[in-house]
Every structure is written in C-alpha cells, then in structure tokens.
Image (spheres, helix red, strand yellow):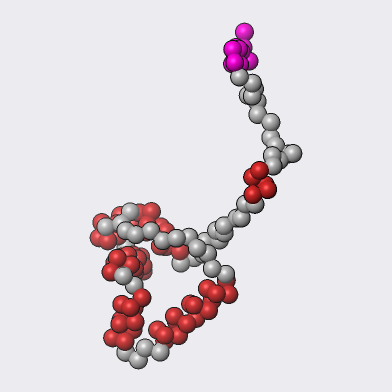
Amino acid sequence: MSTTSRKYFSKEFKRLIWRDFLKKIKNAKTEEDARELLDKFFTENEKFIFEKRLAILYLLKTGRGYREISREVDVSPKTIYFVKEGLKYQPKTKRRAISKESMAAPSANKIKSKFPTYKGKGRWRFLNMS
C-alpha cells in the first residue's frame, strides 16, 4: 500500500473540492456514469478498501456482530469499530506549528527533574535509601 503525504488543506478549500466532487456525482445520469466517475477518481486498492468499509456498514445495519463481520469481511474488530464510530464523529486533529525560536530557547517554566543532571562518580548515590 502506498503512503500519502499529510498536507493539510484549509476548511474553505476542502469545502470547495468536496462540493465540486459531489456535484459531479449528482450530475451522473445513470449508475454506469457514476461508476465510471468513481473509477477515474479511485485506484483499485482504494476501491477495495472502500468496498470493505461499505460491506462493514451494510452488515452492521443488518444486525450482525463484530466477530461475524470480522470473519466475513476479513478485517479486525478495531476496523469495524473505526467505521462504526466514523459515522458519529469526525476527527478533530490539527497540526501544530512549532517555531524555531521555541525549540532553540529553553523555556523559563521548565519542569525540574527529580534526577540530578550532573555526571561522574556518585551520580546515583541519591538512590541509596540507607
């Protein structure tokens, strides 16, 4: 499976590209037109993964249990949980930018360690409780 870069888009740009994509699907006059459109957008591997997720959703709707779905679709129970919960919530993860200045300058509010920072003979003497 190939990996994809984690380039994040603005909310406005995401909204525009999804609106355009959904408009193209909506304008498909037949099921065959919609199928051709999806074939243009998805690789075989992406379609395979998408089909598995659709199968999980279908089997969940029919009332099947995790173990049965897991065997039938050949996925882990974690994947089934991920798909089921994905219907309820959208992930809210965002990248945080770290400035070079914050990395270079030590923080004044740094938490002090219980362990001594000195080196050399006797540096672990504080562990002797006697």
Asked if residue 122 is positioned above or below residue 30 in the image, the reply reads above
| Residue 127, picture quadrant | top right
Q: Which residue is drawn at the image coordinates 46% and 67% (left, top)?
A: 87
Residue 59 image point, x, y percent: 32, 66
In this orientation, which residue lies closer to the viewer: 86 or 20? Answer: 20
Q: Which residue is drawn at the image coordinates 70% and 37% (left, top)?
A: 110
In this orientation, which residue lies closer to the viewer: 53 or 7? Answer: 7
Residue 85 image point, x, y percent: 45, 61
Q: Which residue is drawn at the image coordinates 33% and 54% (left, top)?
A: 76
Asked if residue 91 is positioned above or below residue 99 in the image, the reply reads below
Residue 105 image point, x, y percent: 69, 42
In this orientation, which residue lies closer to the viewer: 48 or 96? Answer: 96
Magenta-colored span: 120-130
Give the quadrant of the C terminus.
Answer: top right
| Residue 22, picture quadrant | bottom left
Q: Is residue 47 visible?
A: no
Residue positioned most to the bottom: 29
> Image check: 7 left or right of 82?
right
